[in-house]
Amino acid sequence: MTDIAPVIVYVDDEQRILDTFETLLPRNIHLVTFNDPNECLKKISNHPSFTTTIEKAITDSNSSTIYPWIIISDQKMPQMEGLDFLQKARQILNDTYLIMLTGYSNEDLTIKCINDKHHIDYFLKKPITKENLTPLLTKFIHEYQKKVFFHSSSDTTYKAWEAKW
């Protein structure tokens, strides 16, 4: 079986946060960062459908397209609010898990996301730590892998991949 590094996209307007985010990630993660959500939307706009092959699901360094498994976005950004960005990303990427990151306790935002069915998969409050990020990412990576790559494979194949994580 081909080894594939999960692709995580992180969008935040604060460069220092983007620069330190990789230190929080588990091993074998391919991180792509953006400080402008519009630039990210351009990169993901040609994402393939659910039936994508394993070869197309990895990030090709020569490609202008990124195939993220998980997108994490800050809420407060000058170019576009995280919720608006994630809504647009959801329209392009039906299978990608979306995580909203916020430094503010905003019950109205949470209620709006739930009531308006924005399909945000998880809310994470800053500051983030390895202890609260790693289990969440591991869960979503396993779910994405099973959903996209193993939807037609045997349970044995999935268990062999899962043992590596």
Image (tube, helix red, strand yellow):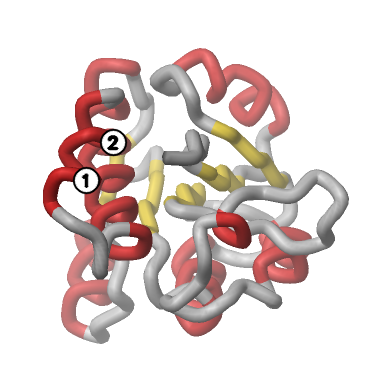
- Give coordinates of residue 79: x percent, y percent: 71, 62
Q: Quadrant of the C terminus?
A: top left
Q: Nearer the viewer, residue 12 or 9?
A: 9
State which quadrant residue 121 falls in: bottom left
126 sits to left or right of 68:
left
47 sits to left or right of 43:
left
* Measured Cα–Cα span from mark 2 to mark 1: 5 Å
Residues at circles 2 and 1 in contact by the CB criterion of under 8 Å: yes
The total number of labels drawn is 2
State which quadrant residue 126 falls in: top left
140 sits to left or right of 72:
left
- Give coordinates of residue 35: x percent, y percent: 72, 45
The crowding category of the residue bearing disc 1, from other C-alpha atoms within 10 Å (few below 14, some 14 to 19, many at least 20), is some
Q: Can you say whether 10 is above or below 115 in the image?
A: above
Residue at horizontal 51%, vertical 43%? 8
The residue at which mark 2 appears reads as: 161
Residue at horizontal 48%, vertical 24%? 28
- Give coordinates of residue 30: x percent, y percent: 58, 34
Q: Can you say whether 158 is above or below 67 in the image?
A: above
State which quadrant residue 128 falls in: top left
- Give coordinates of residue 80: x percent, y percent: 64, 66
Name which residue type carries label 2. Trp
Name which residue type carries label 1. Tyr
Q: Quadrant of the N terminus?
A: top left
In terms of secondary structure, where does tag 1 sit? helix
- Examine the rendering and report whether any part of residue 156 can be seen: yes
Q: Nearer the viewer, residue 162 or 133?
A: 162
- Of all residues, the one furthest to the left in this rendering is 155
In terms of secondary structure, where does tag 2 sit? helix
Residue at horizontal 15%, vertical 44%? 156
The residue at which mark 1 appears reads as: 158
Residue at horizontal 51%, vertical 71%? 52
